[in-house]
Amino acid sequence: MKKKIIVIGSGFGGLAISIRLQAKGFEVTLVEKNARVGGHAYQLKKDGYTFDMGPSLITAPDIIKKVFQSAGKKMEDYLDLIPLDPFYRIYFHDGSLIDYSGDSEKMKQQMELFNKADAANYDRFIADTRELYKAVILDELGAKPFDRWSTMISFVPRALRLKALYSAYGFAKRYFKDPRHQFTFSFHPLFIGGSPFRTPAVYQMIPYLEKEGGVWFTQGGMYSLVEAFEKTFTDIGGTILTNTEVQEIVIEKGQVKGISANDKTYESEAVVSNADFAHTYGKLIKPEHRRKWTDTKLKKMHYSMSAYLLYLGVKRTYPKLLHHTLILSQRYKDLVKDIFDRKILPEDFSMYLHVPTRSDSGMAPTGCESMYVLIPVANLDSNINWEEIKEPFTDKVIRFLEQDFGLEALQSNIEVQEVFTPLDFKSQRNNHLGSAWGVEPRLTQTAVFRPHNRSEDISGLYLVGTSTHPGAGVPGVLLTAEATEKVVLEDLS
């Protein structure tokens, strides 16, 4: 008899671990509360417009390939990847811009306009971030469970040598003096829910990861990657149950026995949760089974920011916007403090725009634009009343894009308009405090300090996803599945 494993939640982490464990000979059932798989990578279709609701780009395609390879499949048979060049366009508050790419000469030419010494330091920065990349990716520390102090202690001398324990911003500041360059080479933690001013510089491996592997999109949108994983899983015999919301992880004498969902019990030897970490422990497991992750401990953890998302279907195009565009406020550190520490909704904002029609015109009607606007905001540990503020804030964002940034006649050309707030992250995704990225990646919540891939409290319970090691972002989440597979095999094979 094959050992049964239940996976809760069908985001990229849940799909990846399901594929890996099914391919290893387990009988895996993936349960999902919503009508379709995808988690944060859900898709919205309306009036001819297609929107990716969450992740909007692919980096490190080799990590994705490994998921397909674990099932004996080829990524190229499932996905049509589109390379992006430049990776992002960054508009600064003074109207200047950088087209950020992996081309060293193009980058240095642009940087020389702002600060020649910074441009001269670019190659040294890249060489040092390569060493971080080597540790996390090539030496596979990102795919290794950090659930033992011996693993952490053995890494510390290397981390100190690589300056990996600096903040991401502090690391960038060692090479660059112009504030535009300091932002350009330190903003990546925001993509994984972290403050650049306290996220460890080990995450500075991301600029080199992008340079080495490129930045990509998929024909049909990011949801095509969800569908590719879904098909791979079912092709190798996996079972998916949608519209199945888990009410409880059933535990007897410290051992997982299965789950209760839709008032029915499903037995299994193990459960892997891709649901939100705080929701998993705080809502699905009774307090008497939790020695470490008590309600008090869960409350003391630091959770990442949330996001305001505006999905717009527009009946014209805006060539000023590339596939990925960042539009920045004059403030950087203070704005981040407003979001992470003061937990207020400031008057100004920085934003990230995803315009997939720049690469795939099929995501909107002919001559139209599919776009989403993401603005980092405080999680629900704030006093922001999103029911009250949602409409006026949306009007403010559209007015800024039209009048201040120069997207001419934007308001009058909108055909589709949908909004997703921290309240929706809580209600639709079960995200604690509406945090879009789970546990914040600060030094005291990294590696061995992060929730472990193997539960510290309960035998047969495992985690994948943003809140466990190594962390958020599509590559990070896929690596959590690889790390979790290792501990499942240790315990159950």
Image: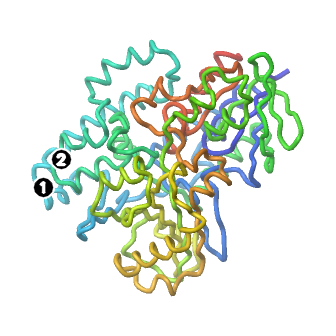
Please provide percent x and percent y for residue 133: 36, 34
Query: In the structure shown, which secondary structural element does the residue marked by tag 2 occupy?
Result: loop
Q: Residues within 10 Å of mark 1 (few under 14, many from 20)?
A: some
Tell which residue pokes out farthest to the right in this image.
264
Looking at the image, residue 239 sits to the left or right of residue 487; the answer is: right
All told, the count of numbered labels is: 2
Please provide percent x and percent y for residue 33: 75, 48
Asked if 240 appears above or below 144 in the picture, the reply is: below
- Name the residue tied to disc 2: 176
* Residue visible at 46% across and 69% down in the picture: 358
Disc 1 marks a residue whose amino acid type is Asn
Q: Which mark is residue 81?
A: none
* Residue visible at 55% across and 73% down in the picture: 391
Please provide percent x and percent y for residue 246: 78, 40
Looking at the image, residue 489 sits to the left or right of residue 128; the answer is: right
Quarter-of-image position of residue 85: bottom left
Looking at the image, residue 454 sits to the left or right of residue 210; the answer is: right
Quarter-of-image position of residue 294: top right
